[in-house]
Every structure is written in C-alpha cells, then in structure tokens.
Amino acid sequence: MIYAPDALILAPLSGFTDAPYRRSARRCGCRYAFTEMVDAASLTFAFDRSKDLLLRYDDEEFLGVQLLGGQTDHIREAVEKINRFNFDILDFNLGCPVPKVAKKCAGAELGLHYDEAVRCFDTVAKYSKFPVSAKLRILDTEDPEPTLKLCRGLVDCGAQVLTVHGRVKKAFYSGPVYFDIIKAVREEFPEIEVIANGGVNSVASYNEIKLRTGCSRVMLATGAMGNPWLFRQLQAPESFSLPSASEWRSIIEEQAAGMVELYGDECAYRHGRKIFHDYLKGRGFNGSLRAIASGTANAADLSNWLDMAVKSGVWADE
Ligand SMILES: Cc1cc2nc3c(=O)[nH]c(=O)nc-3n(C[C@H](O)[C@H](O)[C@H](O)COP(=O)(O)O)c2cc1C
C-alpha cells in the first residue's frame, strides 16, 4: 500500500509545490506531497536548471515526484536521472491542460491519445526504480468508458495508483467535478488505490467527494493554496480552529525564508508575491494591504505588511 486509507495528498502544483511550500503544508498536517511537475525534456537537456525541482528536505516523510513528457526517449532519460534521487513514488502527468504542454502532446493532450499515452507510461514503468502512478483527467463527463480504457492501459503497465481529476481538459481547473466518472474508476479497479481530485476546499466538499466517488483518498490542490490549514481542518474538523495570527505569520515567514535560501532574494520575492496573495485571500484584508504585499521585494517589506495584517485581521486566540 502506498497511501493509507483516508490519506490526504497535496497535489503537484507547478510554480507552487517546491520544498518550502510543502513545509508549510506539512506543518499543518500534510504527510503526502508531490514536487511540481518536472518536464522530461528539461531533465534531459537542462538537468542543472531543473534539478532544484527534485529537492527533498531531510524531514519529508513521503514525497512523490511528477514527470511530464510526450516522447519516450526523453522520458527514459529523465526517469534514469530521477532514479538517482530518493522518492516514494513516480507519478506521470496526463492532466496538464496548458496550451504549451498540449502542443507537445504531453499532459492532458497525451491522455486523449490512448496508444501514445500507454507507450509513454510503459516507459516510465519499465525504467523507474520507484512505484509508479498516473494522474489523469476524465476523458468524458457522461460516458465512463474512455476514461476506464485509459486507466486499464495504465494499470496493465503497472500503475499502482491512479489519481483522477474529475474534469475534462477543456475545463482547466474550474467548474463541476464529475464524481460518477471517478466512481466508475474506483469500482473498476478494486485492486488499485484510486485518489479523487477536484474542487475540495472545505469540509463539505471533502465529504461530498468521498461520498460520491467511494474514494477514501483525496488530493487537495487549489483549495490548499494559501490555506495549508485545510489539511488540519479535514483531519479533525471538530477540534479545528482558525490559525492564530502568530502561527499564520510564522508559516509565511518560514516559507519566504526557505525560498530565499533556495532562489536568492530577488527571485524568491518575485516568485513569492503570488504565494503571499493566496495567504491574504478570504481573510477579510482590504485591497490596499494586498497591493502592498504584491510589491514585496525584501524581508523588510514582508515584515512591514505582516505587521499590518496581524493588526487588522480576525484571528483565533493565541
Ligand atoms: C497553478 C496550478 C498548477 C498546477 N500544476 C500541476 C502540476 O504540476 N501537475 C499536475 O498534475 N496538476 C497540476 N495542477 C492541477 C492540480 O493538481 C489539480 O488537479 C487541479 O487543480 C484540480 O484540483 P482542485 O479543483 O482541487 O484545485 C495545477 C493546478 C494549478 C491551478
């Protein structure tokens, strides 16, 4: 077994789930997490630039790596490079819908081409020294058959886990989640761990996806952006309370410090702005605070708006 029953998993999120991001989630109870997706061609041709994506902190109990690619020669080389590192699982991306990925027939586009998708995944499975899994989108919102066919091909190649995002490629990351198709996968492959993904951002949506798909394992993505406390809340909803101001602040400061260590000041704060923006969402802060945060250029700027936020926010008691 890869994931315990009822496991909550932090999704791979390109541009987000680097090691400092995962540390914030882990402080809030996340055990299972993924790297950002790593492109097979980049690992093949620009290894030094992309290997930072493979960083794993010593205290990370479980970490999966996610590979994106559409060409078997690049995939093979990338897997051989990944094999030199230490991961708990190697996941193959069949869900990324962005045009620049689709153009190379990778991600969700590859998922639409059964033979190529299975050939690529077979290469992953053949060369990986880690257990392998795939993360895919549903292929049709009404008819489960196309999705089941793809899943069967992946399972026959050796997938031990399937993560099913209950939206089609053209829906990107929003809109309804088609629970029945995820449920059909869950029922078709009782021997496989099937992880349900899509739209979980609260206790109610978490309970709904579990109930309607029959999956006990759930992957969190946009719902946990700026809200790593979602892990804690879903694991113990009765005893959950909002983070205190000091906890909220220390999570952000520690994440920023981790990014500075990895990328240097300039790049860390540039990259950090979208992350700070997420932390400010839905907490009642006014637009001017958000505008100040989006100009963060150094540790002093960060400390300045955190002081303001701590004074103006609504917080649980310390
Ligand atoms: C900014 C962003 C980056 C993402 N990066 C990845 C990625 O690297 N690999 C992947 O499989 N999915 C990626 N996804 C998709 C999520 O993992 C997830 O499947 C999707 O957001 C649906 O879950 P949600 O509705 O709970 O957010 C990304 C989504 C977003 C919004």
Image (cartoon, rainbow, N blue to C red):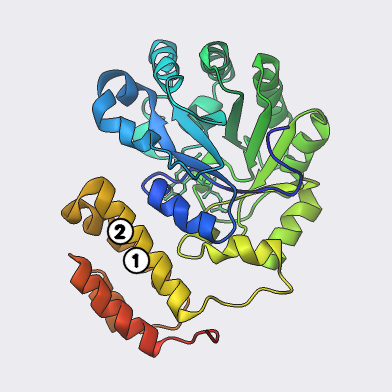
**Residue 157 location (% of width, % of height):** 65, 15
Q: Disc 1 designates what residue?
A: 253
**Residue 80 location (% of width, % of height):** 43, 15
Element type where label 1 sits in the image: helix
191 vs 52: above or below: above
286 vs 63: above or below: below
**Residue 278 location (% of width, % of height):** 41, 66
Q: Are marks 2 and 1 in contact (CB under 8 Å)?
A: yes
Q: Disc 2 designates what residue?
A: 257
Q: Residue at x 25, y 31 (%)?
A: 49
Q: Residue at x 71, y 69 (%)?
A: 237
Element type where label 2 sits in the image: helix
Q: Residues within 10 Å of mark 1 (few under 14, many from 20)?
A: some
**Residue 309 location (% of width, % of height):** 35, 82
Q: Quadrant of the N terminus?
A: top right
The disc label shown at residue 162, or none: none
Question: Residue 308 appears in which quarter of the rendering?
Answer: bottom left
Cβ of disc 1 within 8 Å of ligand 1? no
- Amino acid bearing label 1: Glu
The answer, for residue 183, to whether it is visible in the render is: yes
Drawn side of residue 37 relative to residue 51, left or right: right
Q: CA distance from mark 2 to mark 1?
A: 6 Å
166 vs 309: above or below: above
- Amino acid bearing label 2: Ala
Cβ of disc 2 within 8 Å of ligand 1? no
